[in-house]
Image (cartoon, grey):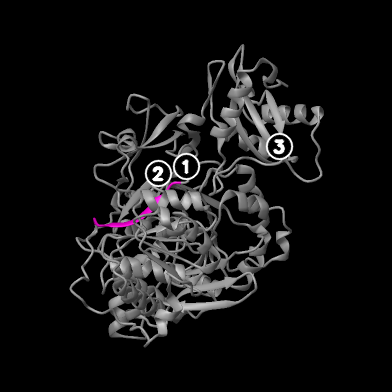
Amino acid sequence: MVQKPIETLIFCTTKQITMVRYSVTMDDSLAASIDKSSEKRNISRSDWINEACTAQLTKSTGVGTIGTTTLPSSGPVFGPEDHNMPDYDEMFRKFAIEVPEYFNFGFDVIDAWANKDRNKLAMLWVNQEGKEKTFTFWDLMRLSNQIVNIMIKYGVSKGDRVLIMLPRVPEWWTFTIGLIKRGAVYVPAPTMLTPKDLKYRINIADIKMVITMEEQADKIEEIAKECPSLSCKVLIDGKRPGWISYLTELDYPAPVSAKIVNLPSMKKTRSTDPLVIFFTSGTTGDPKMVVHEQSYPLGHIVTARFWHDLRMNDLHFTLSDTGWAKSAWGKFYGQWIEGSAIFVYDIRSRFNATEILPLIEKYGITTFCCPPTIYRMLILADLDKFDFSELRHCVSAGEPLNPEVIKAWRDATGMTIYEGYGQTETVLCIGTFPGMTPKFGSMGRPSPGWHVELHDDHGKPVPMHEEGRIAIKMNPRPVGMFREYLNNPDENKKSFIGDYYYTGDKAYKDEDGYLWFIGRDDDVIKSSGYRIGPFEVESALIEHPAVQEAAVVGSPDDVRGLIVKAFVILKPGFQPSETLVREIQNHVKNVTAPYKYPRAIEFVATLPKTISGKIRRKELREQEMKKGSNDNGAPKKA
């Protein structure tokens, strides 16, 4: 018999299996390969072949529409060593997402899974006290339908804007799905917002309804009279005068129907209709409103299928707050399109990062995503005490991850952290995907369906290894790209130029096509004729055993114009000293180009950050500029 690749043989023998159920011919090497994979998974050879044939017959090409009868599949994946993207270059050439004229995530994904398999797990929820709740897609369909009927009762129509401010409680998901089904535009908000923040968001976004819980209600009460568009307030867990009680609506005077009342006001949503407004956290100025369309969830197929490498039996855990776009990236759209279950850890009280280690072990988390800050804390724990045998894939995004942290995590767990890049305005548009060779510190390569270039200040492509502005080609428009900054023509004009969207970040590309993050446009330091990206210096600083966290900015200098200054938080057990300053400076000189070392170092207890955890370098820069304008306050050069 002529030897053929496994996948080819599976395809060729599929018809044979349907006709002669127990007769399969294969050569010895194929049998050995199957037996090896079967042994790893503790299943029989016949079960392996059955799964392989089922996967081949239902294999998704990655091109197609999602409707009430067709759900995308992760494709034929048989073992931990296999991935949804076996060949990056081929997938990049061939992959496309066909967006239908009408699409609604609530009906076309949640309800579709519910009708296909009413017992399929969608969510496993756990709080810090250990209380557990599970939800199937059937549960989510019925609960969200009840919420649609409540929305109809209180006059929330297609296009109305609804602010939802809830912690990681199941109702965040059920209400959001209900709003999507209704065609309303949901506006997520972090629970840490102040009344002043909420007043700004409610008024600028013309919010009609607010959904929150008792512990947050006073904030809304404080500013409600100053918000003329706000006509409805919903509590999910109690009763208040002037508020709609979700618990009361469910049962009084009769239980609300779990089937949507089909009224003339129920209108289908086009893929181009607005879906969500995210407020960017922003390191400068007031937050901007980012509008995504109903097709946005489809864009996260790339995030979940290729970057998270999800399969239909996975339990995926992304550690993020519900108030930010990261929740859409890691605990909502792509995961449920792929048919995976999500793990939700409801954090209310003081949080220690190491809390999540026993959860990964106990619940058999298979894929994991958290921000670099958390990974930096996790590597300080004794990871050998935990069983990570079910965990097969780890990713990180939100800010660049220092190579030293990736190495430490790999040394302790055997798993590499795969980095990715995107914004509130996009889905994952650059990533290191399973099957690619990771380069520590690199963002990776452009995602399938995303054409990314690096431009100079005149919109011309820059040569290899030269700094350029990240530019995303808009013709064709990538699925998952935001529509616009709402009511902000100046920002739209600045970001959309010709056929490109400029992210505001800078990077360079190496000879293998990998992209390396440098920093925001306004974060780059120009010193003595050099252009220095803060991230590379911060990465070098983090590698020093005394440094816990660092931020780098330019500080005024009479000779050099600007010098590199580092603000450093020390690890417990280390004390500031001139000796330590020199030691850290010498360390940076040895790790990166000597001209990049921080000539000034200031030890601090905290760093200014946005409410989403990003360092506000602008605040540090302004602080240094004020010092520079005062001769007595000039920064000390070390």
State the residue position of label 2: 288
For mark 1, does the 10 Å Cα neighbourhood hold few (<14), some (14 to 19), or many (20 or more) residues? some
* Pair 2/3: label in front: 2
The span from disc 1 to disc 3 (Cα, nearest Å) is 23 Å
Instruction: Please give the range of residues in magenta.
Output: 272-280
Depth check: 55 or 232 in front?
Answer: 232
Q: Earlier in the sequence, mark 2 or mark 3?
A: 2
Q: Which mark is residue 282?
A: 1
Number of labelled discs?
3
Q: Secondary structure at mark 2?
A: loop
State the residue position of label 3: 604
Q: Earlier in the sequence, mark 1 or mark 3?
A: 1
Q: Quadrant of residue 555?
A: top right
Residue 158 magenta-highlighted: no
User: Which residue is rendered at x = 38% and y = 82% of the image?
Assistant: 118
Say which amino acid is labelled 2: Lys
x, y percent for residue 304? 42, 60
x, y percent for residue 107? 29, 71
Q: Earlier in the sequence, mark 1 or mark 2?
A: 1
Q: Residue furthest top?
A: 559
- Rendered-image quadrant of the N terminus: bottom left
x, y percent for residue 131? 60, 77
Say which amino acid is labelled 3: Val
User: Which residue is rendered at x = 53% and y = 49% of the image?
Assistant: 612
Note whether 134 is above or below 161 in the view shown. below
The span from disc 1 to disc 2 (Cα, nearest Å) is 8 Å
Q: Pointer 1 and pointer 2: residues touching (CB < 8 Å)?
A: yes
User: Which residue is rendered at x = 31% and y = 43% of the image?
Assistant: 487
Q: Which mark is residue 122?
A: none
